[in-house]
Image (spheres, helix red, strand yellow):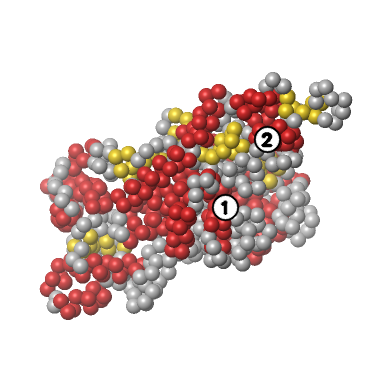
Amino acid sequence: MARKPRKSMSNVVQFLDKLDENCIKNQEAIIGLAKRINPFHEIDWTTPKWNVTQSVQHKIRGHETRKTKYLNYFRNVPNQSVALDGRFADVIKAMTVLRFHRGGQGAPNQQRFIDGWRYIHDAFETEERQIQHVTPEILNKACRQASNRLAENTAYNVHKSIHEIADLLDKNKLVKVHLGFRYAAARRPQNTSGIGYARLDDPNSLETSNSQMADESVLEALGILYQKIPKEALADRVRILLVTLAIFLGRRIGEILTMPLQVVQCNENETYYIITYPQKWSQGDLEVKEERVPLATASVELIKAVIDELKELTQTTRSTAEYIHKHGHADYGLLKEYEPRGWMTAGDIERCFGVSKGNGQAWARNRKVVAQPRPNRKRSSLICWSLDQVKLGMDADLDLRPMLVAANRKVFHKDCLAILPLNACQSEKCTFEYAVRLVDWQQISDFLGSGKTRRKGGENYPKKGKVLSAFDRYLDGEEGKRLAVNSHAFRHTLNTWLDEGGMSDAAQTRWFNRKNPRDTKAYQHTSPTKAALMVRRDLLDGKISGPLAEQIKYIPIGLHEAFAKARIRAVHDVGPGLCFHDFSQMPCSRFLQCTASCDDFHWRSDDVGRIDDLKRQFAITMLARDVAEQRAALGRGRSKDWLANSDKKVAVLRQQMREQGVADFDPNEYMSSKGGVA
């Protein structure tokens, strides 16, 4: 049987309206088209480093460390300082431009695309590199080199880029031979997804551990730091408070860093909540909508205390931010004592702004402040700066742009909780009280020691690093130097804990502000083994309803545990309940009829998180039953079988709703209240 043709990637398009049979002419046409419609504004095509900040400004978050975004068309290491040149470079630049024109990808995505080209460039055996001479052998060699040189995750991203490049070359007829390329050894990394299996009688089955979760020792150390870091250490105290919020809220770090100034509030249902602005890197848009995040009851008092302390610690900085926002410039009150004279020396700058001794001139030079000879001095080498120039230098440090555009309003520094004076988190720089900055991701990363190439000390870290984490600075002994955690690990950890605590996938998806329940699965690191053991225990404790729960009532108590072990070998979440079918043994012949009196379908009798799912399933099934009944009355097809199947589903769903305390309701009214969306 002939193989079906491989599908192209969804973002692969034909850039030209009409393609020529000559691939060289197609290359020239693409380069010409890219130069005509170049969306990267005033960039110089011939340079190997493009500043695309203005073009991707809507994708830059307020909490990002770098504000300037570049695309670098240089060769790969060890020749990273040598620019790609000639027709080869022109085609790469043209394809990058046209990708952005069609898809609007951000700078990191575009740079990964260019990285794939770098490895293709290295794979040529001769110095004469021509796009039309790219072959599957060259692409295979490029992928192998990436695998040998890079970490598994990074190499996988390069492989995906090379796949896209191959598809674009084929789609636009830029090469002499059809490539149809996929790297045979490309594999999604195990730590991205995948399930590890273990025996149910393994003594370690009840342990939950994953490299993407925060280790218990790290969480314990962070608890110690929360109690130990003093308020006098402003930057560190603010950061440990922000980390505490990340641990207990499970929100993305960008949402924590852009939280608005607020207090914990309570709604009409007596549920406590806070306001955040949902963000996701891949979405890229600067405009977001505010969201209410419900708080776990046990964490309410702690979160109240954290937010109150953040407001107290940032009050002075907030006053500065409000002044800057109102007047559009720095508070020149610092210069009051120098106004009669009208100018400042380097020493004056050092005393006024807290600049370290001998760096007054550096402060002025870095801000391009123009110097002048000191008045009434014969020596022209003695310089000073007029107050107007000093004011320009102060204003150069300001950031007047909105951090976010949310809920039809702009969010500025003065509106955020996570603000500090400029350079407050930089141990080797002077802190400037006249300017304000949002705490950014890199500063949280350095605080938690997750930037291993930047970190100083510790047997597992390069000695050339300059950054000391909070574990290094506040914990005694070598133990603290080995601790590190990524801020996103808190999201994985809390998601897993909630899953093990019985929160439904639908409730988790809503609480973590996701659109797709499948994304929630990627954050649940409870092993299938542990999930099965937990459900076994719930069945024995009478917390599970369904066919097995009825059968176990007629089995002698001494055989209950043996019955549960024999019957429950796998557990799958299927929306309104749980499926116990073991797919490793045989496929399921009723995979679309879970709620139709299937012997493998069960549910937790106290799972209130599934009520919305149950209502939705019940409403859809009732409406489908009405249609089946109408058609059965007319004798159409197998409508009677459809009606019988719907009756089975309705009976099971009604039983589930009764156990959750939900009465029957009008399905038409329910669907109307949901906007008619199933």
**Contact flag, marks 2 and 1 (Cβ < 8 Å):** no
**Residue 311, how many percent across, how many down?**
44, 39
* Residue 563 showing in the rendered view: yes
Q: Which residue occupies the foreground of this view, 41 or 510?
A: 510
**Residue identifier under label 1:** 446
Q: Which residue occupies the foreground of this view, 452 or 5?
A: 452
**Residue 30, how many percent across, how many down?**
66, 40
Q: Residue 611 carries which label?
A: none
**Residue 666, how many percent across, how many down?**
16, 42
Quadrant where the image shows the C terminus: top left
Q: Which residue is drawn at 80% across and 22% down?
A: 375
Q: Which residue is drawn at 23% across and 62% down?
A: 601
**Residue identifier under label 2:** 351
* Residue 193 showing in the rendered view: no
Q: Is residue 508 left or right of residue 355?
A: left
Q: What residue type is labelled 2?
A: Arg
